[in-house]
Each structure stands twice: as C-alpha cells, then as structure tokens.
Image (cartoon, coloured by chain):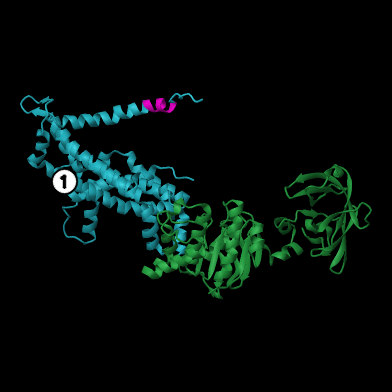
Chain colours: A green, B cyan
C-alpha cells in the first residue's frame, strides 16, 4: 500500500551548518516525487530522514499522518535504492534479493517464488545464481531495484541511482522507474541532480538549494513560472536579463532591456532591482529583418551542438541571449557583429524575482 | 616485427627475491634440515647424519605436553583477544568520531612503547596476593582471604598474553572493517535487519579475513612468547620458546629445531587452512574500484 509522507518544518543542523532549513513537503500516497538540486543542497539529507538513517534537529516526519521519528530504519515501511547500490558482495543475486524476506521469516518455495517474481519484474529472469560482483552496471542496478521492490514497500527511495551509468543505460533505467512506479503503485521519491530524470518521471518535484525548497510544483510549472533566477537556471532557462524598468498592467507588463521593450508576464516584484526577465529559448525565433515587434540584437557567437546550433546574441549593454537555430543553417549570414531581428512567441518572457 | 624485450621487471624482482630467500627462507631451511641431524650428548657435537633422535626427544621428559599446552594457550589467547578486539575495532571504526577514534588507537598502541618485561611485571602488582585486585576484593568484603590463583597460574599467563598481544588482533580487524562499505550496513538495516542481524549476516562475513588474520597474528606471537610465562606463570610453567631455550643451553640443536619444525608445521597448516576458508590474502588486496 502506498504511503503518504508529511515533512513538517524539518531542520537538520550539523553544528553551524544547516543541511535542511525549515523544510515542509506533503507527498501524496502513490506519487512520484523528485527532489532536484545540486550536490550539497540537502536533498540526500532529507532522504536519510525519510529512510530513518538520520534524525532531524527539529520538526516532524510523518507517514500517513503518524510521526515516525522514533521508528528506526529497519522498522520503517521504506526501502531504498542506494546511490552506490550497496549490493552485498558476499551473496548471489537471489540471496541479495531475498535478504529482506528471509529476515521476515520467509523460506523455501514461498521465498523462491517471490525472488523469481522480483527478478522477472526487473527483467533478470534466471539470474538468481549469479555472482553480483560479475554483473554489468545496468544489471546491478536492476538487482538493487528488485531487492527493494520485493519488500513491497509503501515508499521507495531512489538516491541518485542513475549516477555512473552511461547515457543509453540511464534512459533505459529511467523508463524502467516509470514502468515500475505504475506497476507497484508505491510512493516513489527520487533524489537527483539531473533535470531530465526529474522532468520525465515526476508527478511533482521540488528544487532545493542550500537546505531550502526554492520551488515545489508539477514539472511544467517550472518552465511557465520559475520561482526565481536560481530555479530558472537549474531547469535550463539560461537567458535571464536584468531590466532597466518595468511597467506593470495587471499580470502583464513591459520590461525595458538595454533600451528595447519586451512584453513580459509578471510573476515577481515589479522593482527592476529585485527581478529578472527569464526568456524561454524555445519561444524565440529569427524574424525577417523588417519585423516591427522584434528585438534587434548583435550576433556574438555560435556553438555547434549536434542537432542544433546555439546562437549567442548581445544587447547594447552586453547582456546576452541564447537561441537555438537549425544546425545546417548557413551561418555565413550570421557573421559576428551583424544585427538580427529576434521575434518572441506569446508568453516567451516572464518577470521573476532575482 | 617484435623483438623479445629485455625482462626489466624480472631484473627488478631479483634483488628483493634474493633478500627474502636469504633472510627468510634460508634460516627456515637450516632449521628443518638440522632437525634431522644427530647430537652426541657426551661431546655436544652435531653430526650431519640422518636421524630422528630430535623428534624422538620431543616425546621424552613430557616435552610434547609443553607443545600441546602452548598450542592450547595460543588458541585460548587468540580467541579471547578476538572477543575483546572485535567490539573494540567496531567502536573505533563505526561508533567513535574522528578525534575519539584517534585517541582510542593511541591508547591501544602506547603500551607497545614499554617492554614486555615491564608490562608483564606490572601485572604482578595487579594480580599478586597484596595486589590491586586482591586488596580491592578484601576491602569490599567480597573475599575473606586473598585469591591465590590470580598470580603464578595459567590464568595470570593468559591475562598477560592478552594484554601484550591484543593490538595484533585489533589492527587486522580494523583494517578489514575499513574495507566494508558502510552503506552495506545501511542497506541491511533498510531491508529490516536489526543490530545483531546486521552483524551476523553482513559485517562478520565481510570481515572474516580480518578475524582470521587477527587470530593468526596473536596465535603466532603467543607460540613465540616467553616473558609472560616466566614472569606470571607458576613454578614449572613452560612454553615452547622457554623449552627451546633450555634445550639450546646444552647445544642440542637437533632437538630444538625438531620442536621448532613441529610448531612451524602447525602454523603453516593454519595459514593454509585460513587462506582456503577465509580468503586471508584478500585482506591485502587492493579492491578500490
């Protein structure tokens, strides 16, 4: 049965360092929730508290509304896939997968059936007798998943489980997580620094920074309305421009950047000193030179990126903006220093707090 | 076209190999060979003719009982050392913080700076009729008269041996525990294991090589020890090295070497069994990924 989690004003201090600073999250039963952040942001500390491997300095952690502060890790309905997988090197695949069930007192054919089912689930049928030390990275990953899932946990914690896998395997295992989440119906909590994983898997996600939650939302909202410049940068909106002035009318307005006006949606303070204009790269386009409502910018460089080409453009005051253009476009027309017109699709720019 | 390359590596290997052969293997070979020579009690002369007189001498004068009691003492001491050292190593590695673990390691090591003689003698002051323990027991009214078996007994000898050789069990255990990834213990816990299950199903199996190495080190040290028995043992208490010393006084090298050979064989046997069962060699492997 999936279990809901309530993190209630939780802080975790290590001496003067606040790994977690007054964090509150409500995770619904059966949700796929992702904690996203760079290393040291506190996401793993939070995971340890949920798993029972550490204790908060203040606040409460509850499962289905009941405080689990006094429940040690071995009595929590939680299982973890550790970052380094932590497979027992002195046991076979089947012994690893059956470890938790044997502790529960299962043995004989009932144990064997469960182990086989779990191996089937992660597509490792027939691997039971293998030595875990001789498996490939992806296979080890699956054993770790099977070992956790065979316990039928209400909550599954995934602590950066895809780190160290190559790109193809990453995508494969990522899809596997999605499939297993649907199959098991358990509450999944993924900790990662990789926004691709977070975006493609999560029902909701939280971006963390310095022990605090910067934003908690469904993935699409992070692009529509990032809470601040940090979140915008973290999800890949790299163009953040400082406005000279902001004119507000309702929830829309106009920001002046290096003398040029950009229509923006207002989602932050109207004070130009406290806000930035975030521009989504996918809503910019190269406009014909005589378009009216376009930005006039100078080409300052291009970078070949394989399937597309990044075009870096500068405002008069030196602030830059990045747009993606076709890789096979004739860049002879885009000599450095040349002026181009850039059109903005609706809702391309949003004013957010700095 | 490939020319046979100059075997640089084997050239580099030669000097250390020669050193090991000359310093280690050669004396052992002499011990084994001389144990089969004969000794004339009248002239104290050793003759290089094949004889089993040395080995026959072991069966005389109760010498074999000394060997057996030495091995029993060594087993007991090594076992007790492990019982004490395992929790110690566990505490140092898993429980103590950085500062405390360094302090504990220092406390274990510092007694090594004094000689075995002084350390054994200090146990007399603790275990004697008027020693610390007896005085305490009398003062507390637990006993009416001093306990005699505390000193000059096998008990005292084993206490002295444990005190002397405990670090030889602690350090290999510590070494083997350092090689255990702590997330493995977290994983066991995560899957429902309490402290004892964690210990018996994960930590003990993964530290077997350290357990055996610690056992072997203490065992070997005890078999070669003499001070503790001489200082703390009762009248007539003996141990292999004391007995060998006595035999050497009359220059009966074949007998002395025969005793040594038997002890060597036992120790070599233990090493081989240990390596087969517990993977002793793995303790010294570099398993870093």
Residue B245 placement: quadrant: top left
Front residue of this view, candidates B151 and A30:
A30
Farthest left residue? B42
Residue A116 placement: quadrant: bottom left
Q: Is residue A348 visible?
A: yes
Q: Secondary structure at mark 1?
A: helix
Residue depicted at 43% across the width and 49% down the height: B178
Residue B123: x, y in percent?
24, 46
Residue that label 1 marks: B68
Which chain hosts label 1? B
Q: Was residue B11 drawn as part of the magenta stretch in this picture?
A: yes
Residue depicted at 30% across the width and 54% down the height: B83
Residue depicted at 81% across the width and 63% down the height: A269
Front residue of this view, candidates A309 and B84:
A309
Q: Which residues are magenta?
A: B8-14
The answer to whether residue A93 is above or below residue B156 is below
């Amino acid at each position: 049965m999936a279990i809901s989690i309530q993190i209630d004003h939780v802080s975790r201090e290590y001496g003067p360092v606040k790994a977690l600073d007054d964090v509150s999250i409500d995770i619904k039963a059966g949700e796929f929730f992702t904690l996203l952040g760079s290393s040291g942001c506190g996401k793993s500390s939070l995971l340890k508290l949920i798993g029972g491997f550490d204790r908060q300095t203040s606040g409460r952690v509850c499962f289905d509304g009941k405080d689990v502060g006094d429940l040690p890790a071995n009595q929590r309905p939680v299982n973890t896939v550790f970052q380094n997988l932590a497979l027992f090197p002195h046991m076979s695949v089947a012994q690893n997968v059956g470890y938790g069930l044997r502790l529960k007192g299962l043995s004989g054919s009932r144990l064997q059936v469960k182990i086989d089912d779990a191996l089937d689930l992660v597509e490792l049928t027939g691997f039971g007798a293998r030595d875990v030390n001789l498996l490939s990275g992806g296979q080890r990953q699956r054993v770790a998943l099977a070992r956790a899932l065979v316990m039928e946990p209400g909550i599954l914690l995934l602590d950066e489980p895809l780190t160290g896998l190559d790109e193809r395997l990453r995508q494969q295992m990522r899809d596997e997580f999605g499939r297993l989440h649907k199959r098991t119906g358990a509450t999944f909590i993924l900790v990662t620094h990789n926004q691709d994983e977070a975006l493609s898997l999560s029902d909701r996600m939280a971006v963390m920074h310095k022990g605090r939650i910067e934003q908690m939302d469904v993935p699409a909202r992070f692009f529509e309305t990032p809470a601040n410049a940090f979140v915008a940068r973290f999800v890949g909106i790299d163009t953040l421009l400082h406005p000279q002035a902001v004119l507000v009318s309702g929830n829309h307005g106009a920001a002046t950047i290096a003398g040029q006006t950009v229509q923006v949606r207002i989602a932050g303070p109207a004070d130009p000193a406290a806000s930035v204009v975030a521009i989504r790269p996918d809503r910019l386009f190269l406009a014909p030179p005589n378009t009216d409502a376009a930005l006039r910018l100078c080409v300052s460089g291009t970078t070949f990126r394989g399937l597309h080409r990044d075009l870096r453009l500068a405002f008069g005051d030196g602030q830059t903006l990045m747009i993606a253009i076709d890789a096979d476009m004739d860049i002879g027309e885009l000599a450095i220093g040349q002026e181009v017109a850039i059109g903005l699709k609706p809702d391309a720019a949003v004013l957010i707090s700095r | 076209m490939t020319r046979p390359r100059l075997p640089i590596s084997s050239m580099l290997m030669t000097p250390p190999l020669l050193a090991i052969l000359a310093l280690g293997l050669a004396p052992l070979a002499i011990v084994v060979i001389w144990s089969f020579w004969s000794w004339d009690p009248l002239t104290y002369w050793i003759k290089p003719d094949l004889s089993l007189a040395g080995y026959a001498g072991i069966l005389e004068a109760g010498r074999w009982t000394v060997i057996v009691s030495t091995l029993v003492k060594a087993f007991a001491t090594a076992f007790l050392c492990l019982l004490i050292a395992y929790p110690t190593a566990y505490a140092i590695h898993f429980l103590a913080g950085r500062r405390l673990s360094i302090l504990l390691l220092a406390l274990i090591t510092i007694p090594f700076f004094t000689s075995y003689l002084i350390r054994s003698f200090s146990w007399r002051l603790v275990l004697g009729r008027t020693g610390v323990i007896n005085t305490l027991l009398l003062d507390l009214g637990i006993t009416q008269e001093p306990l005699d078996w505390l000193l000059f007994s096998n008990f005292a000898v084993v206490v002295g041996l444990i005190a002397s050789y405990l670090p030889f069990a602690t350090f290999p255990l510590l070494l083997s525990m350092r090689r255990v990834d702590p997330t493995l213990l977290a994983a066991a816990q995560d899957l429902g294991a309490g402290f004892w299950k964690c210990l018996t199903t994960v930590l003990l199996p993964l530290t077997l090589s350290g357990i055996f190495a610690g056992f072997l080190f203490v065992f070997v040290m005890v078999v070669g020890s003499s001070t503790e028995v001489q200082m703390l043992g009762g009248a007539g208490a003996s141990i292999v090295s004391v007995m060998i010393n006595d035999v050497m006084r009359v220059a009966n090298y074949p007998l002395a070497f025969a005793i040594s050979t038997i002890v060597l064989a036992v120790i070599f046997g233990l090493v081989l069994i240990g390596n087969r069962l517990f993977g002793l060699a793995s303790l010294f492997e570099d398993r870093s990924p």
